[in-house]
Image: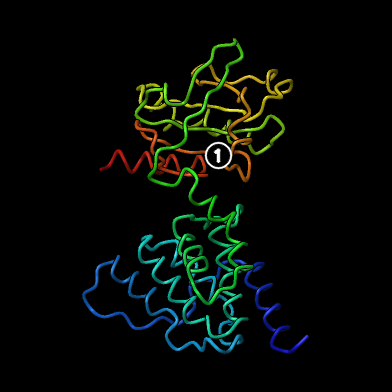
Amino acid sequence: MTKKCTLFILIVSLFLTQGIAQNNAKLSDLPFGLSTDEKLDYSLEHYWDGYDFKDVSTLGQKGVILDYVVLLSKASVESAKKSIKQTLVRASGDNLIFSLFVECYNRFLFGVDSRFMDYEKYLAVVEYITKSPDINELQKQKFIFPNRVVMTNRLGTKVTDFFFKQKNGDQGSLYEIKSEYIILFFNNPDCENCSLAKEKIVGSEILNNYIADRKLKIISIYPSKEIDHWSRLTYPQTWINGYDYEGKIIGDGLYIIRKYPCIYLLDKDKKVLLKETTVEKIEQYLLRSLSV
């Protein structure tokens, strides 16, 4: 193994295991008179000024990439995607540097346990890899599944309808449910995090107020036909609780569930407002909608 390759492995390990740094990367001086959003966009655009994209060690300084990820998380989708593609272009001259950036984007923007996960921003990586004439077919094939994940029930699109059956035998479909907002709560009876999320929803004053005002409905779905354990669980009476008796949600790829619970926030037209989100982020979204 070469010295450069060993350094690369050490740097990637450092990036993926250390905590978030305190924004100690050296940014370009900000021009006077910029708005808050303009300052963020400018900092992101010029973040890598002065860094040598042919030297792994200059990019391996503590906190450099982690601080960059924090900036990406705060930036608009358009600004973040532009910056991501620019880094990949600059890194394309060196295979190790390029792999470093791709690995970090995979970890932070696509990682199922990452608090920075953002499919819309990660789409910049998918688009670059799949459309670049300089990327071989083997590398492109690795992004077939990520592309499916991003594009299936994408943010801003109408989700796929499905049918479900409740414990009493009543059948229904997602599109039959009318509400200003819908929380679609895919869960598994053996999932501890699902139980915790259920408790958070039940205990949320914000969500309960929306439910009381008839502006929100909770649709709890067990995406399986094997219901022995599920049928013994109890859910709030205000929820619609069902299971996928046809086995199509996962079997036919109507939804890609990478981790339980898998939570969506939908609007009245069944468009995706938040995808694979958390109870806390839903609360924040609804609070912001009140102030608009």
| Farthest residue, direction left | 33
* Residue visible at 58% across and 31% down in the picture: 199
Q: Amino acid at mark 1?
A: Tyr
- In the displayed structure, does residue 33 sit left or right of residue 237? left
- In the displayed structure, does residue 127 sit left or right of residue 96? left
Q: Residue 263 in the image: state x and y as whole percent.
A: 53, 38
Q: Is disc 1 surrounded by few (<14), some (14 to 19) or many (20+) residues within 10 Å? A: many
Corner quadrant of residue 59: bottom right
Q: Looking at the rendering, in which quadrant would you find the C terminus?
A: top left
Q: Residue 6 in the image: state x and y as whole percent.
A: 73, 83
According to the image, label 1 marks what residue?
255
Q: Nearer the viewer, residue 167 or 208?
A: 167
Q: Nearer the viewer, residue 251 or 97?
A: 251
Q: Residue 57 in the image: state x and y as whole percent.
A: 61, 87
Q: Is residue 191 above or below residue 105?
A: above
Q: Is residue 163 above or below residue 122?
A: above
Q: Residue 195 in the image: state x and y as whole percent.
A: 64, 32
Q: Looking at the rendering, in which quadrant would you find the N terminus?
A: bottom right
Q: Is residue 292 above or below residue 176?
A: below
SS at badge 1: loop
